[in-house]
Structure formats: structure tokens, C-alpha cells
Amino acid sequence: MTSPASSLPVAAAHPRLARVGAAARWTLAALACLWLALCTAVGPLYWDFENGTIANWNWTNTAFFVLSFAIYLGLIVIMVRFAAGQRVLPRAISGRLSRAGQQHSNQALEPSQSQSVVADSNVSKRHATVASRFATLGRWITRGTNRFWKLALVFFIGWLWVPTTLLAAFGADIRSQIREFSWAWNQWTGLQQPYIGFFSFVPMDIYPTAHYMWPPDPTYLTDQHNVVLTVFYGAVAAFSRYLTGSNDAGIVALAAGQMLLAVFCCAATANRFLNRPWMGVAQSTKDKNGSSTGNVSSTTSARIAQDAAPQLAGERARFLILAFFLCCPLAVFATISITKSPLFAFSFVWWFGIWYELTQTWKPEGKRKGLTATAPIRLPRHSFVAFVLSTAMMLISAKYAWYIIALQIVLALIADRRRWTTYVVALLIPTMLIHGGISLAISSGAIIGGDPIESRGVQLQMIARVASRNPEGISEEAKKNLSDVFNLDQMADAYSQQDADPVKSSGIQAKKVSYKWRTVTPEDMTNFNKAWFEIVKDNPVIALDALLAKCFGYFNVTDQPYVSMDYYVTSDYVQKNSTWIKSYNHNWREQITGFTRSWGKIPVIGWITHGNFYVVMTLLIGAAEVIRRRWLTLMTHIPLLLLMGVMITAPANNFERHMLPVAFVFGFVVLTYWRESLAERRIARQAQSSASTTMTLPQ
């Protein structure tokens, strides 16, 4: 890890290597811009679901590509120049603004223009009154959000209308989980039920899960949606049926509980970012007797570290972050959406805040960059417990969480090994217990694991698109290799460029059986990759179309979501198939979702309601952080990049629930970049001032 001070440009011992490093960092940023520009340019092509293909690329798409690339790269340049203390606005504009301000000041001081003086005086009084009111409002905002309990109260009151008027939001997933648990409960209580059979249809066939994965002894629990959540949701619903005769009361209770969890997680992280001005890295600390340990080698280093320490957030940052959580449909509807992604997202927000505390309390190890080592700062007990619990919540809410946590363990142990016990206990042990325990349960036959076909969405879309658009382009050998796994005719018929689930035969019993989950064997899957590679080699353009059409929307701010968060508020499972929830404020649900959809369709203004806007901006900020060499901050932001990889491999294009974690922490990412940039500017000015003073000393 590096401190904010050490992320500043320094005089390199090897200028040539420094230039190579700078070129590499800018190249990486340019590649990110190229990817975003490509996703933006192909949007108009793939909005034509029937005939859209990259083969129809024309001058219009080229213009979109060039313009998008220029805008994205320009935003990175602006952020980098701002962090470096350089002029952001063009010279002509900044000069004009400066002259206008000076002219206004001079006119206000002209004694010969009495009328102008009176007019300017009145205007100044009005401006002063407005400024005073804004200052008062700012003080109230700061005072109202300067404690954890105050933030929690703000979130609770701001979100209270959601569970009280909308009750709950859900889709097919929780119904499948409830069904799984019910069948498992019936089995545990001795009820005989169908199991493996060609004509039977049980919960495991809905996703579906290949029959070769089912253990010989009947079991009805799967890890498709994480078995811990399935058992918890199913048990609550079963208790609800016992008391009320339907699942609805249990679902409403789950939604209310998730809203309270969201209040806690968001308030805890907001408190860390807004109200916890930890002293910066390498700053002197006090021992038990109150004496300084002197962990800096010079007064200048101490001053630099102190300057880099974050201060309490201003009222504008507080207002904008709170406004996002309380007004953006992504956050508002996620509070009551009973599906794994919102639960993971709120857990991730909590986890993200603890990483911020870790980085702000980091101490350098050994003599490096003029700093000497001190004892590492330990997390407070409540933060350590929060670290453990947030890690566990992430692991039980999303199966891909363990990949993210595993990488963070490696990075943390390399960069901050003196606090290795913190990372072992808070990250490694929960991962071993939860992920390892579930893996052990799968291997023992207690539950059924998720089908590996779930991770092959990109490959399936490529094969299905070729089968749909150019069936003659599939060789006989490839057809033979796929014949035991997929029905190509059904694949072609089920293909949708927005969603790979139909190709995987996910859904109810009337679905198209393209995936032969009932008869496929592990041996049949051995030739799958070979067939896929051959099909892609023979149909490269169609395969590229399949890839881009499945993921471009995540990185295109102009693309409307395939499934937005308001879907869960007015899904048929809520409005038609529930017992009594459908009768409670039925029309109000339609009205509120209609408003958010109309808002989201407004150009530019509607972008802030969609997840892809926050994904794109987060990627650009990450590129700027790479250029500024903020390795410490980047280490904590690596999970955001991994989550973008999850989006690319997800079954559906522009599925907003996959973007929730990135959107929820975006405000904190911006605040971090702003703080570190201001610190760099202050440090650079101090260094320049020190250098000037040294040069003017008598020789």
C-alpha cells in the first residue's frame, strides 16, 4: 500500500522507466475509454433486435465511437489535471471568468457611479442574504448527519414510505426458493415426493440443474440462489403460512427486515466517510504515556501526512450522497426487493466502508519514502466485528462473493501484512466456514450444487445466435459434439440477445428444452468447449455480436435497462399471483413505477436513475486513479472492477440488480477521489513553497 503522500509524482531515479510507466498507465486508461466508446457506438445497432449486427457498422457509428472516446478520455484528463493542481477549464474561459470577476469588483469600487454603487449594494445584500440562508441550511445538514444514529434516522424516515406503501417487491427467485424449502420440509417430515424422473418436474428442474448432479438419496435443497438464503426465506414463508395461510406476511416481513438492514449498512458507511476524520498515514501517534512515537523522519513528511488526512465532509457532499440513496429508484426499490443482489449490495456497502477505515489507519512498514515504521493501528472492536459480519453476509447472499474476497485477501496480505491477523480472521475464516461448508454439503449429497452451465452464458449466447442467424455455419462435427447437451433447433428458437436464461431452459415447465439437463452427463460436457471454439472460429462476426449484445448495455449510458429495479415492484408475482399483497395499493405501485420509468427515459437527466451511468463513471475514476498512482485506494476499489466482470458474464444484458453495489458506493468513490486530489494539490503547493524558500536562501 502507499500513502496519499507517496502517490504523488516524485523525481524518478530512472526517467526512462518513469516515462514508460506513465505511458503504460495512460494506455490502460485509453483502453478503458475504447471499451466504453465501443459499447456506446454499437448501441444503435443492437437496439434492432432482429437485424442488428456489427457488420452494419457505418459512419454514424464511427462518429458515435470517436465522440464517445473523446468525451471519456476528456473526463479522465480533467480529473487528472484537477488532482495535479493544473488548470481544468481552457485558458480563454478561465481568463474570461477571472476578468469578469475583477471587472465586477472594480465597478463596485467606482465612486463616480453612485447609481451603480447603490444597485450593486442592493444586489450584494440580496446575495449576502441568499448566501446566509444557504450557509444556515448547510450547517443544519451537517449537524443533522454528524452521527451514526442521525444518519440512520434520516435513512429510516426517508425510506419509511417504501415498505409502508409498497410492502414488498419480488420476482421468480423467492418463489423458487420457497418452493425448494417446502419440498425439503415435506421430505424431512416423511412425505413421499417424486425425485428423478423424465416426466416428473420438481423445483430443481426449474433452473434447471442437470440430473447427473443429483445425489442418489433424494434432496430438494440447491445452492442455485445460495442455500443459506433459501433456508432462511423458506423458513420465514413456511412460518407465515402456518400463521396466516399464505406466504405474503412472511414476504412483507422479509422486505421490512431488509429495509432496516439497508438503513444500518448505509448509515454505518456514510458515517465512516462523512464523519470519521482519521489522521492520515505516517502521522505521529501517541503512546500510552502520551509521548510521540515519531514515525516520520522529518517535519516536512509529518506535515504532508497531516495535510493528506481527510476532514469532515462538507454539506454539499452530504446532501448529494443522501439525495442519491433517498431519491434514486435503484436504492429506493432495492430496500424491499427480496432477491439476492440487493442484499449483497447493502452488505457490500457496509464492507466497503470498513476498507476505507483500514486504508485511513494504515501505517507504513519499514523505511520507505522518508517514513519509518510504527506499530500498525488495530481496528476498533466494533469495526472488526462489522468486518466479519459484512464478509459473512456477502458470502451468503452471492456465490461470486468468495472470488472477490479471495482476491482481497491476497492483496491485503501482500500490502499490509503486519495486520495479517485482521484479514485472516475477518476474511479468510468466514470464507472457509461458509463457502467451504457449502462445498462440503454439496460433496456429501446434502444439497445440490449449482449447474456449471450457469457460468457459460457467453458461450451459450454465441452458439445460440449462430444457430439462429446462420445454422448452416455449424459444422457436422460441432453438431455431433453438442447433440448430447443441447438441441440446436430449440436453442435457435429460444435465443434472445438480451438474456441467456431461455437458452439454458430456465423457467416453468412449459419452457423450451434446449438444454438436455435430464439426460446430459459429465462426459457429454467434455466436447462442449471444442464445439464452441469451432463454431466461433467459423462465425466470428456473429459470435462477436452475441458477446457485445449480451453486455454492451452495462457500459452504455444511453441504453435503457433490460430489467430495472422497478420491475420487482410491479411484477406479476406481486400484482397478480400474490394472495393479498396484490390488493394493497395496487394502482399506487403502477403509478410510482410509471413515474420512475418516465424519468429514466429522459435524456441525460434520466441517466442518474440507471446503474450503467455509475458503472461508466466508476470505471473512469478508476482509470484516473491508475494514472495518479493511487495504489492504496485502487486496492480497495478492485472489487468494483471484479463486479464489472460479473456483469459481462451475467445471463442478461443491462440487468440493473447486478449494478447495485457499484452504484451504491459511487458517491463514496467520488468523495475519496476529491479528498485525495485536494490533498495532492496542498502537498504540491507546500513542496513548491519549500523549494522556493530553499532557492532564495543565501548561499
Image (cartoon, grey):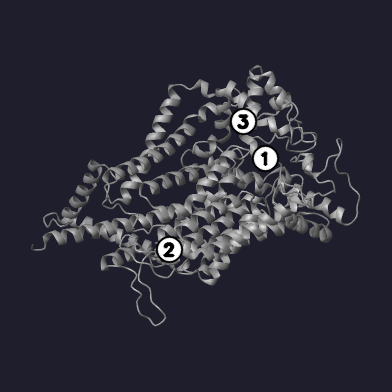
Number of numbered markers: 3
Q: 564 above or below 150?
A: above
Nearer the observer, 9 or 48: 9
CA–CA distance in space, label 1 to label 3 = 16 Å
CA–CA distance in space, label 2 to label 1 = 39 Å
Residue carrying label 3: 497
Nearer the observer, 205 or 251: 205
Residue 423 is situated, as x and y percent measured from the top left of the image, at 54, 62
Quadrant hosting residue 232 = bottom right
Q: Residue at x 49, y 65 (%)?
A: 419
Q: From the viewer's perspective, is the residue at label 3 or at label 2 nearer?
A: 2
- Which element carries disc 1, helix, strand or loop? helix
Question: How many residues crowd around disc 1 within 10 Å: few (fewer than 14), some, or many (20 or more)?
Answer: some
What's the amino acid at mark 2? Gln
Nearer the observer, 335 or 14: 14
Of mark 3 and mark 2, the one earlier in the sequence is: 2
Horizontal side, residue 688 vs residue 360: left or right? left
Horizontal side, residue 551 vs residue 131: left or right? right
What's the amino acid at mark 3? Gln
- Which element carries disc 2, helix, strand or loop? helix
Of mark 2 and mark 1, the one earlier in the sequence is: 2
CA–CA distance in space, label 3 to label 2 = 44 Å
Nearer the observer, 264 or 600: 264
Q: Residue at x 45, y 57 (%)?
A: 415
Residue carrying label 1: 454
Residue 641 is situated, as x and y percent measured from the top left of the image, at 50, 46
Q: 151 above or below 636?
A: below
Residue carrying label 2: 360
- Which element carries disc 3, helix, strand or loop? loop
Residue 665 is situated, as x and y percent measured from the top left of the image, at 50, 53
